[in-house]
């Protein structure tokens, strides 16, 4: 589902994000809030100016990964009240990348917080990531399938619109041909019949009757074609 050229940038962005987060936490810097503010500024800049979707998504992924890991580390690690943000991070990655990337991210996060294991509650908290990961992968697949279906619906709507437009054009062309070409042809035939009927002394009575009937039918068709012309005028207005 995901090609290698799309996965590699995601792996790089996550590797950089996790490495930087580990470095920052070990640095014990008092400027974590300032760092998060800078990351938010970069995020806003990215949303407004970076048009490459792949680059933009991977940059956003790295920003959120660093923000979540630093916030959790600064507020108590595994006992942090913000630990649930990791669940949102996993779901976000599942929507943007392959299941293997989500699983790899989970394992790296477990390694990231493994040094904070101090009691059974911490172990349960960390183990919960392994339970959330399959759920995130399933939701990610469903999300991608939904996008595909929406794409198909858009294509079908476009094809339907094009078909309707083609039918309208064909109907209009047919009506125009009936109205103009047929009307002109019937007018000429009516003229020919009128000329024949003006001098019918040399033909038999039965032939005279046939000519009269043909003339009457031609006139009726001309009247009907005039009605068609009015319909075309209404349809094309």
Image (cartoon, rainbow, N blue to C red):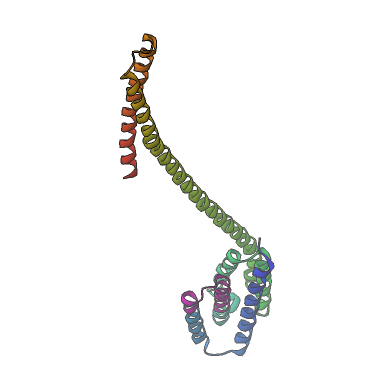
Range covered by the magenta-colored residues? 45-68
Query: Residue at horizontal 33%, vertical 13%?
Result: 201
User: Quadrant of residue 21 in the image?
Assistant: bottom right
The quadrant in which the C terminus is found is top left
Magenta-drawn stretch, dominant element (helix, strand or loop): helix
Residue 14: x %, y % from top left: 63, 75
Q: Residue furthest front?
A: 202
Query: Residue at horizontal 46%, vertical 45%?
Result: 166
**Horizontal placement of 39 versus 230: left or right?**
right
The quadrant in which the N terminus is found is bottom right
- Say which of 17 and 28 sits in front: 17
Residue 180: x %, y % from top left: 37, 37
- Say which of 232 and 53 sits in front: 232
Residue 117 in view: no
Considering only vertical position in the picture, is 98 above or below 37? above
Residue 46: x %, y % from top left: 50, 77
**Horizontal placement of 104 versus 96: left or right?**
right
Residue 183: x %, y % from top left: 36, 33
**Horizontal placement of 34 versus 28: left or right?**
left
Residue 140 lies in the magenta-colored region? no
């Amino acid at each position: 589902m995901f090609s290698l050229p799309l996965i590699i940038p995601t792996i790089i962005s996550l590797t950089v994000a996790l490495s930087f987060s580990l470095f920052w936490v070990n640095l014990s810097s008092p400027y974590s809030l300032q760092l998060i503010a800078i990351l938010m500024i970069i995020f806003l800049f990215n949303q407004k100016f970076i048009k490459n979707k792949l680059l933009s998504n991977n940059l956003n992924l790295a920003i959120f990964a660093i923000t979540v890991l630093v916030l959790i580390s600064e507020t108590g690690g595994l006992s942090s009240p913000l630990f649930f943000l990791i669940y949102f991070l996993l779901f976000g990655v599942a929507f943007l990348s392959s299941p293997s990337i989500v699983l790899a991210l989970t394992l790296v996060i477990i390694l990231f917080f493994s040094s904070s294991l101090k009691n059974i509650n911490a172990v349960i908290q960390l183990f919960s990531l392994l339970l959330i990961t399959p759920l995130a992968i399933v939701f990610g697949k469903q999300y991608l399938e939904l996008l595909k279906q929406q794409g198909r619906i858009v294509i079908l709507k476009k094809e339907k619109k094009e078909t309707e437009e083609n039918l309208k054009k064909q109907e209009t062309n047919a009506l125009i041909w009936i109205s103009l070409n047929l009307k002109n042809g019937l007018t000429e035939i009516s003229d020919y019949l009128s000329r024949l009927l003006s001098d019918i002394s040399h033909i038999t009575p039965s032939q005279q009757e046939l000519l009269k009937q043909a003339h009457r039918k031609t006139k009726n068709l001309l009247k009907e074609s005039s009605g068609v012309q009015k319909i075309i005028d209404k349809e094309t207005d």
